[in-house]
Image (spheres, rainbow, N blue to C red):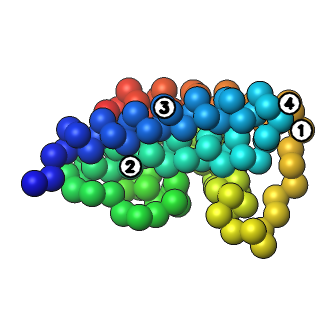
Amino acid sequence: MFKIIEQINYWKQTAEDNLETAEILISNNKYIEGLFFCHLSIEKILKALVVKEIGNVPPKSHNLIYLHEMAKVSISEEQRSFMAVLMKYQLEGRYPEYYEPIPSFDIVKRYLNLTKELLLCLKKKL
């Protein structure tokens, strides 16, 4: 039997764990890998929100915009644009032929902070 609360808690916890992993990777100069985990963190919190919205298992998709639309939660246009930025880093993590240039530490740090803010914003909607 599908248990909505357990699914939501699973996705929420793994989103938080993935953000922690992103921080560790970035602090060890693994910027692309860290940004991949930033994407994963947002993907998973969105999946928690999708479960809440549809009452079923979320789709096997990595597309943040698609998951956001399924979740039917409001966020700022800046946050939505940032999700599009994060999409670039999930591609490199999954598809070796796709190479995104490695951003500077300042940009990576900004993306990490934006991920933290977006995760917090989305968690409040659960």
The answer to whether the residues at label 3 and label 4 have Cβ atoms under 8 Å apart is no
Q: Where residue 63 sits in the image (x, y, percent)? A: 52, 60
The vertical placement of 97 against 89, above or below, is: below
The answer to whether the residues at label 3 and label 2 have Cβ atoms under 8 Å apart is no
Residue under circle 2?
A: 47
Q: CA distance from mark 4 to mark 2?
A: 29 Å
Precedes in sequence: disc 3 or disc 1: 3
Q: Where residue 91 sits in the image (x, y, percent)? A: 67, 62
Q: CA distance from mark 2 to mark 1?
A: 30 Å
Mark 3: which amino acid?
A: Glu
Q: Nearer the viewer, mark 3 or mark 2?
A: 3
Q: Residues within 10 Å of mark 4 (few under 14, many from 20)?
A: few
Precedes in sequence: disc 3 or disc 2: 3
Q: Which mark is residue 106?
A: 4
Precedes in sequence: disc 3 or disc 4: 3
Residue under circle 1?
A: 104
Q: CA distance from mark 3 to mark 2?
A: 13 Å
Mark 2: which amino acid?
A: Lys
Q: Residues within 10 Å of mark 2 (few under 14, many from 20)?
A: many
Mark 1: which amino acid?
A: Ser
Q: CA distance from mark 3 to mark 1?
A: 24 Å
Mark 4: which amino acid?
A: Asp
Question: SS class of the residue under badge 3?
Answer: helix
Q: How many marks?
A: 4
Q: Residues within 10 Å of mark 1 (few under 14, many from 20)?
A: few
